Image (cartoon, helix red, strand yellow):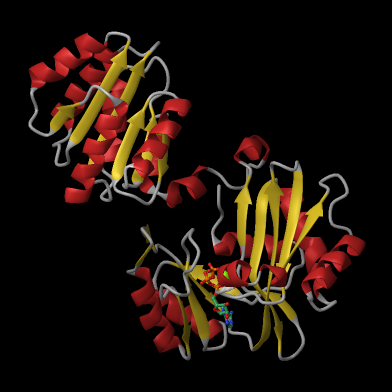
């Protein structure tokens, strides 16, 4: 799970990493009061869990409290890459001399962490990494040894960061370990004209497998994320939101993953995916379809079921039940194969809904769903 910038900022502050003074709100009027408290001029920042907020107009300087209110109102109405802005953070502006990039990220393949750092941080770090990879230092970190002052010195030197960043590098590692995080990123870490080092932006990704021992970020943190993910989780469904147009429902992680690949291979992009799991009942199918259809980005839905433990006629019953519960406004392509497939197909044939089509092969079904998504 990703944390919001303001949550990451709170963790940094607790570990003694210098951050600008800041407050969070969902109200433009309150933003005006906060700006006054923070000294008048503030940077208003959209709190959404996606990168590139600045370039999308989600980070703006307001020079007085009245402007802070107007700016907050404008940013709170925004949608940044499919993420509605529900809160803004107001931060004291700092006088930046230089911007750096620092991150610790889990390197699963190598079984250790990687420190990534650059003296050329800021909003164009992706371009720096692509065009001049030598400007980005990558230093392996052994999780058992961690980031000592000596290790931090090595990272800072390799990246060309000033020596004052060493202390921050050690404390960032402490944040990572303390939170069971798989990613801690600061972009930018800045040096001000007054010579202070400050973390101006933060991203922290927690290890979901460690959630049982991290009670701090509870259900409300997750619920705030994506209302559909929260609705799906409440029904015990495994639903993940993606950026495309084709809704994907399948049974079993392997089939769902390969379905996503095939959708991409047909020139379409999955909007989301939902794994109804093995032995799924009609109710699970109906719940799943309801969730997928409520995603406004979905233009067509592909239901791909290979019946093993799950019987295809139960899936078909679920689809029929969902058709009674929700008004289908988007085309549905269904491919049923395996256990009780012919009975399942017969159930759908009998219902004969104009927006439901059946296909016998996965490739054929995906092509159809992609065509429908591109046409819609
Ligand atoms: N408190 C601040 N004072 C002055 N400038 C700031 C402040 N916060 C952010 N900025 C400027 O705005 C830029 C973008 O801010 P930030 O990195 O928080 O947003 P971002 O666009 O989300 O970045 P990312 O692409 O990493 O998500 C920073 O690189 C910095 O130059
Ligand atoms: Mg940033």
Instruction: Identify which residue, 158 or 200, lies in the foreground.
Output: 158
Residue 39, image x, y percentages: 57, 88
Residue 11, image x, y percentages: 67, 60
User: Which of the 4 quarters of the picture holds residue 134?
Assistant: bottom right
Name the residue rendered at 73%, 73% in the picture.
18
Q: Is residue 371 above or below residue 204?
A: above
Query: From this viewpoint, which residue is outermost toward the right?
Result: 150
Name the residue rendered at 63%, 36% in the picture.
209
Circle count: 0
Residue 4, image x, y percentages: 54, 59
Q: Is residue 282 visible?
A: no
Name the residue rendered at 12%, 34% in the picture.
355
User: Which of the 4 quarters of the picture holds residue 108?
Assistant: top right
Q: Is residue 40 left or right of residue 226?
A: right
Residue 26, image x, y percentages: 41, 66
Q: Is residue 235 left or right of residue 143?
A: left
Ligand 2 is located in which of the four quadrants? Answer: bottom right
User: Which of the 4 quarters of the picture holds residue 123?
Assistant: bottom right
Name the residue rendered at 32%, 69% in the picture.
77
Instruction: Identify which residue, 295 or 64, lies in the foreground.
Output: 295
Q: Is residue 170 above or below residue 54?
A: above
Q: Is residue 50 visible?
A: yes
Q: Is residue 160 left or right of residue 264?
A: right
Q: Is residue 263 left or right of residue 17?
A: left
């Amino acid at each position: 799970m990703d944390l919001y910038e303001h949550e990451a900022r709170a963790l940094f502050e607790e570990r003694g990493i210098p951050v600008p003074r800041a407050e969070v709100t969902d109200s433009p009027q309150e933003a005006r009061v906060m700006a006054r408290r923070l000294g008048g001029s503030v940077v208003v920042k959209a709190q959404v869990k996606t990168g590139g907020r600045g370039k999308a107009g989600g980070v703006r300087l307001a020079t007085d409290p009245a402007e802070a209110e107007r700016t907050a109102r404008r940013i709170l109405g925004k949608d940044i890459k499919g993420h509605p802005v529900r809160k803004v953070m107001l931060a004291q502006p700092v006088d930046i001399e230089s911007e750096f990039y620092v991150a610790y990220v889990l390197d699963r393949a190598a079984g250790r962490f990687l420190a990534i750092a650059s003296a050329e941080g800021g909003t164009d770090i992706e371009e720096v990494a692509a065009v001049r990879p030598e400007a980005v230092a990558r230093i392996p970190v052994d999780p058992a040894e961690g980031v000592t002052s000596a290790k931090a010195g090595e990272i800072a030197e390799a990246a060309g960061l000033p020596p004052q960043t060493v202390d921050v590098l050690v404390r960032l590692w402490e944040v990572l370990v303390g939170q069971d995080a798989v990613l801690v990123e600061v972009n930018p870490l800045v040096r001000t004209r007054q010579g202070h080092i400050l973390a101006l932006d933060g991203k922290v990704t927690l290890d979901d497998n460690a959630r049982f021992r991290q009670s701090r970020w509870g259900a409300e943190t997750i619920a705030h994320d994506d209302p559909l993910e929260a609705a799906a989780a409440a029904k015990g469904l495994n639903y993940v939101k993606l950026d495309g147009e084709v809704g994907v429902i399948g049974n079993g992680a392997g089939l769902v993953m390969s379905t996503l690949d095939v959708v991409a291979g047909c020139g379409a992009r999955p909007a989301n995916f939902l794994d109804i799991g093995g032995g799924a009942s009609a109710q699970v199918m109906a719940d799943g379809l309801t969730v997928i259809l409520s995603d406004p980005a979905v233009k067509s839905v592909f239901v791909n079921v290979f019946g093993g433990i799950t019987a295809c006629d139960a899936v078909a019953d679920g689809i029929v039940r969902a058709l009674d519960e929700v008004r289908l406004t988007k085309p549905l392509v269904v491919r049923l194969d395996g256990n009780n497939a012919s009975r399942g197909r017969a159930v759908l044939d009998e219902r004969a809904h104009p927006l439901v089509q059946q296909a016998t092969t996965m490739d054929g079904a995906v092509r159809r769903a992609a065509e429908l998504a591109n046409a819609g």
